[in-house]
Amino acid sequence: MHATLPLLAHTDFPALRRDRFQTLQVNLGYRCNQSCVHCHVNAGPTRTEAMDGDTVDLVLQVLERRALQTLDLTGGAPELNPHFRRLVVAARALGVHVIDRCNLTILFEPGQEGLAEFLAHQQVEVVASLPCYSVGNVDRQRGAGVFDKSIAALQRLNALGYAQPGSPLVLNLVYNPQGAVLPPPQAGLQADYERELATHFGIRFNHLYALTNMPIQRFGSTLVSKGSFESYLQLLKGAFRAENLPTVMCHSQVSVDWQGDLYDCDFNQQLGLRVPLPGRAHLRDLLEHSPVGQPIRVAEHCYGCTAGQGSSCGGALAGRGP
């Protein structure tokens, strides 16, 4: 695995500060039942890192102390953390909106029986990875058989009420480009997904998020191996749009790793760029201090969030208000 931080650390990206704190994005661990080429976390079946129960309790304390609106759960496959369901139930009891960043195939893993029903009962928003609507493209990026399982999972979620007219159950899909290119315009891509998934599989969803691949971890290392890291970085920088800066996700959220350490975003987490506080910034600090007004650590990969239509954990930024 090639280290990419030395290639990204020196930057002329504009300075940013956090101007509000609404979302806590929590990485529950790096274990996953898939090993995707574009994964910026380098997650996979052999990873063992997982948030423990004491740190999960701290997450809940921070949600309550800071009156946060949203808990955004990610991984790896966050559902593989043994405390996942307890955390969801407790957060919902606090009135917090919970997002589960789900790879869909996890619904069919041993030990995950009843997961779809649990998510529906707790009214968890599902943000589901589906990098294309064709079997060849998905299986090439995520592994053989992933597409068929993903379709079956979406159909199960639809049957439980997700994305149905008048239902409070929200199902959003995520698209990642295959390779060192920017995603196409999100609106047109969503229309393609809606048409193809409805026509061939009877599937509904609420929104499609088009996310730019970040030049870090597994994807970044692949770029280095192919000799295309610098050209991809220049693609991102050449497509920079200043109007995307006010709506990048780090303005309103804090990212937490499986040990409880704090970062400005999930990408900084994977690069080891902690929140710029004295000492080792940790969840405990959020019990005593608000992160609002703090400077945000930036590096060259930040151009990935502001290139073209923009990209964040909530999809394209173009036209979105702060």
Image (cartoon, helix red, strand yellow):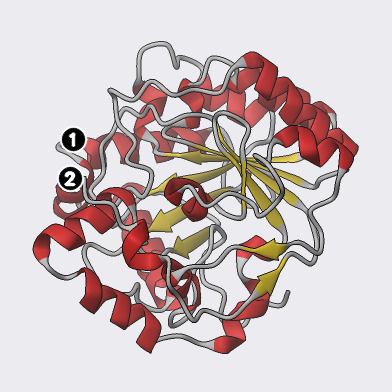
- The residue that appears at 38% across and 71% down in the rendered structure is 189
- The kind of residue tagged 2 is Asp
- The residue that mark 2 highlights is 139
Answer whether residue 130 is visible to the viewer in this image: yes
Q: Position of residue 270 (x, y in %)?
A: 44, 47
Give the side of residue 239 with respect to residue 23, left or right. left
Q: Position of residue 178 (x, y in %)?
A: 23, 62
Q: Position of residue 230 (x, y in %)?
A: 23, 74
The quarter holding residue 280 reads top right
Q: Position of residue 95 (x, y in %)?
A: 84, 36
Q: Quadrant of the N terminus?
A: top left
Mark pair 2, 1: CA separation: 6 Å
Q: Which mark is residue 189?
A: none
Q: Residues within 10 Å of mark 1 (few under 14, many from 20)?
A: some
Disc 2 is placed on an element classified as helix
In the image as oriented, which residue stretches furthest toward the left? 226
The quarter holding residue 122 reads top right
Q: How many marks?
A: 2
- The residue that appears at 64% across and 36% down in the rendered structure is 124
- The kind of residue tagged 1 is Gly
Give the side of residue 11 with respect to residue 279, left or right. left
In the image as oriented, which residue stretches furthest toward the top? 111
Answer whether residue 176 is visible to the viewer in this image: no
Q: Which mark is residue 145?
A: 1
Contact between marks 2 and 1 (CB within 8 A): the answer is yes
- The residue that appears at 47% across and 29% down in the rendered structure is 29
Residue nearer the viewer, 154 or 236: 236
Disc 1 is placed on an element classified as loop
Q: Quadrant of the C terminus?
A: bottom right
Earlier-in-chain disc, 2 versus 1: 2
Q: Residues within 10 Å of mark 2 (few under 14, many from 20)?
A: some
